[in-house]
Amino acid sequence: MAPSSASASPIPRRPGIDSGIPFLKDGYRFISRTADSLDTDAFRTTILGRPVVCLRGGEAARFFYEGGRFDRSGALPPTVVHLLQDRGSVQTLEGESHSRRKSGFMQLLTGGPEIRLASIAREEFAERALVWRGEESVTFADELPELMTGVAMRWAGIPRDRWDLEARSAELWAMVQQAGSFGPANWAALAGRRRTERWASALIEDARAGRVRAIPQTAFAAVADWTGDDGRPLPVEVAAVELINLLRPIVAVSVFIEFAFLALSRMPKLRTAFRHEDHSELDGFANEIRRRTPFFPAIAGRAMADLDWHGETIPQGRWAMFDIFGTNHDPRLWPDPLRIDPTRYREGRGDVHHIVAQGAGSYDVDHRCPGEPATQGLIAAAIRGLSGTRWSAVGGQDLRVRYSRLPATIRSGLVLNFR
Ligand code: HEM
């Protein structure tokens, strides 16, 4: 059912006491299912005792992302914040300070450097295919994080003798995989994150002191030189956090790449086209993968002032959650939303700007992900890198998606045969 905004109250309350358990059980679908049942795009509830307004849809995307209405401070549980962002990072800044820092990210990730990143990835995938061809089978989920960590390190200009690939890849991957977890798994990932931070801090200090040579024009050199609002170099720990903010998400793109190959294993025509270097649908396909993949289910923010939603007030300080996964599957924006349809963008069945997997609004002033073009390029690069290689999904594996975990995983980890 396509919901209308015809509910009596623009922000009805979800019946029941607390939505914590239903949300934790079904994080990807909780908001849209509830919104459908209440015939609304916004509803009130509490999650683990905290009042929250849940929002979904195209209008909600603009409302949540544009105009600086919501900040991110205190909006996520500390277990998530420490793994994914941490103190002083661009995501925790607002206004002028945010725009200033964000322009640094944009310089590193758009207008050319993202093309270099994609060509490194393509090369690394093509190279690795030679190894995979010699193996009986390959569990993609086990291979991608380390491969992508190497891609990230090389692109960022981290000196090779400092990569410490095995440890860093395990830590960066754990930050992505355990962001939605609680208890021991989360604590272990947090301990790993602290080790990555020490590693990154030492690199920044060494670059500033001239003990290592940061190759000019690379992300490492740039971040070591970034200055704060006061014109002085960023505190070492903040520069370290931002360096990690460039490396970790590149490793996270492994999730999209895994889902891209899952989709391709079920789309033989497209797979054959790509194998024969016909890449005419590649851009549309990569967009569909970003739209369809269950990565971040939702994103939280806090109202910075009293806000008006269709005549009802969302009070200052109120927690809001914008439904990423539901909006990416909203039939009003995406006819036949579950279908991976690379042609929909040119044939008017979807607008690429409505994909909210990586946020919405503008890159410069809003919190939209500066790594969006890079992500698109990396998905395409993995496919191009393996274009010349025959591969198939091994039979008898469990390719169902486990939606109860964040981010969702493919149960058997996608076992491929490259022979
Ligand atoms: C797996 C692919 C990716 C996903 C799913 C993703 C998702 C997101 C989302 C949802 C946001 C908005 C957060 C918010 O609203 O507070 C965001 C912001 C951000 N992303 Fe990504 N991203 C990805 C890849 C990348 C890449 C490749 C980079 C850099 C190399 C990157 C760097 C950032 C940064 C620095 C921010 C903060 C922007 C700000 O606060 O203004 N991301 N990302």
Image (cartoon, rainbow, N blue to C red):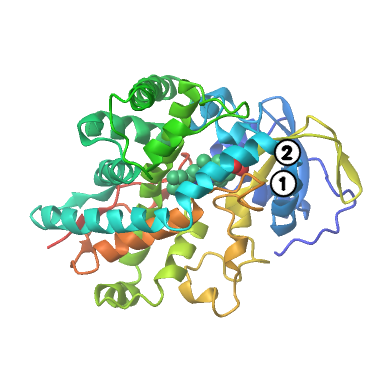
In the rendered view, would you say 344 is above or below 48? below
Above or below, 411 against 182 in this view is below
* Residue appearing at x 44%, y 24% in the figure: 186
- Who comes first in sequence, dot 2 or dot 1? 1
| Drawn side of residue 23 relative to residue 372, left or right | right
Which residue lies under the disc numbered 1?
64
* Nearer to me, 361 or 162: 162
Quadrant of the rendered image containing residue 248: top left
Q: Which quarter shows the N terminus?
A: bottom right
Residue 247 visible, this orientation: no
What amino acid type is highlighted by mark number 2?
Phe
Q: Nearer the viewer, residue 147 or 133?
A: 147
Q: Classify residue 111 as left or right of residue 9.
A: left
Q: Position of residue 296 (x, y in %)?
A: 53, 44
Q: Label 2: how many residues lie within 10 Å, few (<14), some (14-19) or many (20+)?
A: many
Q: Is mark 1 within 8 Å of ligand 1?
A: no
Where does label 2 land, which residue? Answer: 70
Q: Residue at x 57, y 35 (%)?
A: 90
